[in-house]
Image (tube, coloured by chain):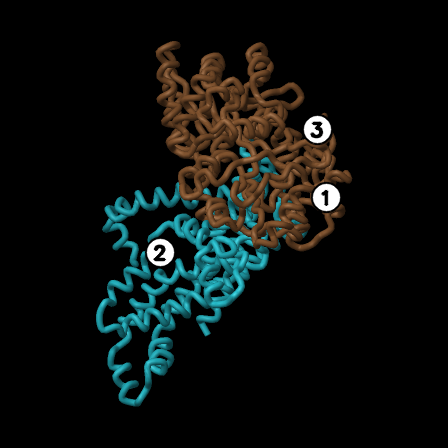
Chain colours: A cyan, B brown
Amino acid sequence: MSRSRLEGQPIGYLFIAPALLLFAIFIFAPLFGSLYLSFTEYTVIRSPHWIGFANFHTLLFRDPRFWTAFRNTVYYVVGVVPTGIVISLVLAAALEDLPRGKQVFKVLYFIPTITSVVAIAAVWKWLFAGEKYGLINYVLIRLGLQPIDWLLSPKWVMPAVMIMSIWAGLGYNMVFFSAGISTIPQTLYEAATVDGANWWERFWHVTVPMLRPTLIFVVVMGIINSFQVFEQVYIMTGGTGEGIGGVLDSGLTMVSYLYDQGFVKFRMGYASAIAYLIFGFVFLLTVIQNRLRAR
Amino acid sequence: MTRAWISVVLCGALAAGCGRSSSTKSDGLTMWLVGSEAQARAIQTLSEPFTQRTGVHVRCQAISWGEAHSKYLTAVAAGVEPDIGTMGLTWGVEFGRLGALVDLRQAFSQDVQTIQQQTFPGLWQSIEQDSQLYGIPFDVSVQVLYYRTDLVPAPPHTWQELTTLLEQLQQANRRMMIDWGNLSWIGYAPFLWQAGGSFYNPQGTAPTLNTPEAVQALEFFRDLYTRYGVPRTAIPVEQGLRTGDFPLVLSGNWKIVGLTVSAPDIAGKWSIAALPKGPTGRATAFLGGRTMAIFARPNKHEQAWQFVRYLYEPAVQLQLYEKGVKTQDAYLPPNIQTWDQLPMDPVMKAVLKQQASEGKGPPAAVGWTETTNVLESAIQEVILQGADPTVELHKVNEAMEHSLKSK
């Protein structure tokens, strides 16, 4: 855009000013504020006290809970992102071929996305109730399987949170895929059909390659969002004993650890350092993904 | 990450907003109630006679348990505290040490003396430390043993009777459930006290979880899960009692109203009993509750104290309880005088009173709240992963010592 064109439209700045102002106050200022705090010891009551890289040093080398949280988060991302994407992609493709009721199903699948995660997690907490008292276990028993101590056994806390998150995230991804699919020229499908391709072959050889840009976007967003998983952990592991994270920290993720340190223990400096480490990880992952995409 | 920081700013803005509305209204008192909206409204209604009597207006706002602790802390940091706040039992010591609360022992010593005599001693130990008192009891909750009268011939009176009963029940595929304190230090606490142990020495200067009593209690608590089938999972109390699969349940007194409302089909088939006595012959239960504290900065200490005293009057507590029954906020009054008029089944009332009188709350020692998660994971390591109780408790004891000294 040339300089003269910008000068010709000063009114444009006025239009974006409110948004910019809000962005500056509520995003940029806290962003840099927390960067500063990550180098301090700050308990809210007393003013911040500069301690250099001590928070980061402790986190990376002396805090086993942080690494537990890191492992759990990676486990969550690996468990949720691919599964969620595969299911929602297949669903989106299947919905496109429905002769009628397409919109109804789209709405149904999208409802969890616009429902508060807190409400969803609270309901799923009941579904995950122990022994035969939870609906999920009831079904398992009916199928002749053993009931699972979902939310109070170190092995199953994370899978329980993952199952819920995959379910709750289906609609969001599906909308992107549906939009992507509707841009694929119908002629490609017709040509494939003429060549004798069945539904799965058309899905695999037409839909998936044509959706590459959408897929990359959904994967990147999925990883960024999953890395910051919080509400479901907070609701599903909270209230059972001491604080957040579930039995033996089996459900502790990085943002929930941040919350625990910052808003329960009020170590704001330490929590800010965690925030910047999360930022670092997400940034690194995104850079790697961009490299892969460029190839 | 950005989300977290947006919430920081929002929290601050909220706290500031609330505070400003209260501080500009210099003619009245503001009270924050940690709990339900319904109970805040009940207090608002109950404040009317107080306003007529004294001319002081009261505004009571509910804040939820989840955000209460951070809301108080940010309010203190921003200098926009309410005049009165209800809080968890151990918060008073914490906020008091920050200088945010009025030391009531010092400011109103005469009244405090009277109040102390009217309430349960175990509760008092949790809120007073080194002759500093940052709040008086607002309500009390207590652990009791629920049992199905048609399935359990008699509630167990001792640990021995409990295990014998559990063995008998197991043969009929019935078990016990621990609800309030499941896999947690709150569930371990009564057994610790019943075994003659404690978290700290009486002066609160040294932790005492490296004692044989503490180990014995943890072994007993573990065996309830590993040997006697207490579920290591969460099951709704109402369901367990209704089906009869769990004819014994260790839970809090609030389930009395809960069961009456949501399990009418077993009405008359269940009752409550005191916890079984441990080796010491005591049936100590865990006590929870809220306190009412006065914030130092707003400087309306005298008026605030009058209202706090008013809420402690038996007649007012009785009304609060009666309103609470309808909204499932029926927490027990801390003033023993109120109990005579409490509309409740006399048998249950006797059990609750006995348990509250013998019960103990969380320790008021320095560094306690910072180490509960260490204790909690030790208990879970022992029960879920088969770790050695002695080794784990020694580790916890060291952590508690460290936390005590670093303050």
Query: Which percent across, then down, holds residue A59?
Result: 62, 49
Q: Secondary structure at mark 2?
A: helix
Callout 3 amino acid: Gly
Are labels 2 and 1 assigned to the same chain? no
The percent position of residue B261, horizontal first and vertical second, equals: 40, 38
Residue type at tag 1: Leu
Q: Which residue is mark 2?
A: A113
**Residue A149 versus residue B404: which sits nearer the camera?**
A149
Front position in the image: A196 or A3: A196
Mark 1 and mark 3 lie on one chain; the one further toward the N terminus is 3
What residue is shown at x 74% (from left), y 50% (from top)? B388
- Residue behind mark 3: B204
- Mark 2, other Cα within 10 Å: few <14 / some 14–19 / many ≥20: some
- Give the Cα distance between marks 1 and 3: 18 Å
Q: Which residue is mark 1?
A: B393
Position of A50 relative to A206 (above/below): above
Badge 3: chain ID: B
Disc sitting over residue B128 in the figure: none
